[in-house]
Amino acid sequence: MIIPAKDKGLWEQLDVLPEDVEEQAQITPILIKSLGSIKRAIEYLRESDAKEAIAVLKKWDSSKPIMRKKIPLEAFCLSVNVKPKVLIGVIMQAVVEHGSKATELMIAAAQPEIVQKTIKLAKTYRGSDERRIILQNRGVLPSPKNQVFINNGSVDNRKQVANVSLGQLESDNDKIGEAVDNFNSQRMLKDKNDDHVPVIDVVAEEAE
């Protein structure tokens, strides 16, 4: 690594040699390629409670802007005795946790609308699945075996929204379908006997 003479003073302030940086894992290209910039990587570090993150951020924040621009992040790591490959692991963990929190927030924000839609569908003919979900969630119906769990996405605060047995749902739908077909057949037979009443089939109500 060739350092311009005018930048040597900046390296001396960190008390790190360019040769030492060259021997370490080069995380700067990876961070720029994956996150877009070192600035973005620093933002993720600020969300971490790891001691390595705290140490690097302390050195980073106390340094002049020109140092952050001219000197790679690897050098800041070595200046506080943190290996760059350890720091990138801390950043990766922060990114994962950030994504998880963002996902939970989106699910929480969408939940009222989803519940409202589920209730609306449950009131229609084709809403047998939704009716069972709601009734099982409220404890009106027992939870079946071979359950499918739908949670709110939280690892630490899991709240069961529904326990749905797909086999039972399909069975219920078949039974309802058979009942409707039987009703229509009986109605058609009656109408033929009356010879003056038009045939009216049961039509499934569609949700808006």
Image: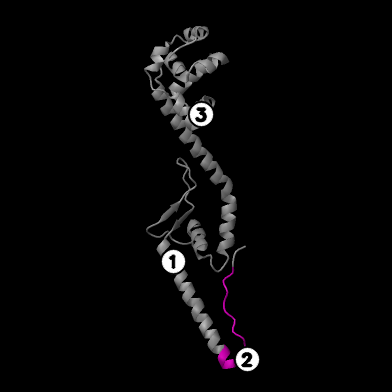
Q: Nearer the viewer, residue 5 or 105?
A: 5
- In the picture provided, is 186 more to the left or to the right than 51? right
Segment colored magenta: 191-205
Instruction: State the SS at label 2.
Output: loop
Q: Nearer the viewer, residue 178 or 140?
A: 178
Q: Is residue 105 above or below residue 135?
A: above
Q: Residue 156: percent from the left, percent from the top?
A: 45, 40
- In the picture provided, is 77 more to the left or to the right than 116? left
Residue at the spot x=42%, y=12% of the render? 18
The quarter holding residue 146 reads: bottom left
Q: Residue 178: percent from the left, percent from the top?
A: 47, 76
Which mark identifies residue 170? Answer: 1
Specify the amino acid type for callout 3. Answer: Tyr
Reading the image, the residue beneath label 3 is 44
Reading the image, the residue beneath label 2 is 196
Residue at the spot x=51%, y=65% of the render? 128
Q: Closer to the N terminus: mark 3 or mark 1? A: 3
Specify the amino acid type for callout 1. Answer: Glu
Q: Residue 131: percent from the left, percent from the top?
A: 52, 63
Which mark identifies residue 75? Answer: none
Pointers 1 and 2 in contact (C-beta within 8 Å): no
Question: Real-space Cα distance between discs 1 and 2?
Answer: 37 Å
Q: Quadrant of the C terminus?
A: bottom right
The quarter holding residue 52 reads: top left
Q: Nearer the viewer, residue 5 or 102?
A: 5
Mark 3, Cα crowd under 10 Å, few <14 / some 14-19 / many 20+, is many
Instruction: State the SS at label 3.
Output: helix
